[in-house]
């Protein structure tokens, strides 16, 4: 019987190994707290709604007790940890796509932020929603299109 190349025997092995190598490479950049090349947690939308800056961060698998929100100077800092509820040994994985462990996301607060003590946060269906009151709604003044050549 002909022997199959290792890739054909386990087609997921190469994608799993490539993912591990990339994770290890990007993990080295984690020593810079405000530099986020590829945040493992917390895909975030930031938008203005009325006189509030809204920061919505997805945190699947987390609960409100797993998340802390702080203001450090002019930065909004979201930290926490997502824990796996069931232990699975690494050698039993075919593909590991979800993330577990500690996370930290840092967002600059705009100069228009009003009383920082008025910032409110709530956790709904795996999404952390932080509302930052603004002194005034941002104006579109000075916004214009630039022609792309």
Image (cartoon, grey):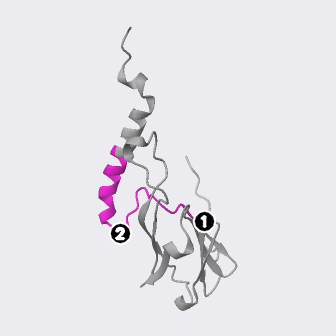
In this rendering, is residue 135 above or below 32?
A: below
Magenta range: 21-44
Secondary structure of the residue carrying tag 2 is loop
Q: Where is residue 95 in the image (x, y as percent from the top left)?
A: 46, 42
Label 1 sits on residue: 126
User: Could you tell whether 91 is left or right of 58 in the image?
Assistant: left
Left/right of residue 31 with respect to residue 64 in the rendered view: left
The image position of residue 15, as x and y in percent, is 42, 36
* Image vertical order of residue 39 relative to residue 71, above or below: above
Rendered location of residue 25, percent (x, y): 31, 50
Is 121 magenta? The answer is no
Residue found 36% across the figure and 23% down from its top:
6
Q: Is mark 1 on a helix, strand or loop?
A: loop
Q: Which residue lies furthest to the right in this view?
A: 50
Is residue 138 something one can see in this rendering? Answer: no
Of badges 2 and 1, nearer the viewer stands 1
Give residue 64's quadrant in the image: bottom right
Contact? badges 2 and 1 (CB < 8 Å): no
The image quadrant where one finds the N terminus is top left
Instruction: Decide which of 129, 137 is in the foreground and name it.
Output: 129
Q: Which of 24 and 99 is in front in this view?
A: 99
Looking at the image, which residue is at 38% across and 69% down? 34
Residue beneath label 2, please? 33
In depth, the one of 86 and 22 nearer the eye is 86
């Amino acid at each position: 019987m002909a022997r199959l190349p290792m890739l054909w025997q386990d087609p997921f092995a190469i994608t799993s190994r490539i993912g591990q190598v990339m994770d290890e490479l990007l993990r080295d950049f984690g020593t810079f707290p405000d530099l986020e090349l590829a945040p493992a947690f917390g895909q975030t939308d930031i938008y203005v709604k009325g006189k509030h800056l809204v920061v919505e961060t997805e945190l699947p698998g987390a609960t409100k007790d797993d998340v802390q929100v702080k203001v450090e100077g002019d930065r909004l800092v979201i930290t926490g940890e997502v824990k796996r509820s069931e232990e699975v040994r690494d050698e039993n994985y075919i593909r590991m796509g979800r993330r577990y462990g500690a996370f930290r996301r840092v967002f600059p607060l705009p100069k228009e932020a009003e009383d920082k003590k008025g910032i409110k946060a709530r956790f709904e269906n795996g999404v952390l929603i932080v509302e930052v009151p603004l002194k005034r709604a941002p104006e579109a003044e000075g916004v214009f299109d630039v022609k792309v050549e």
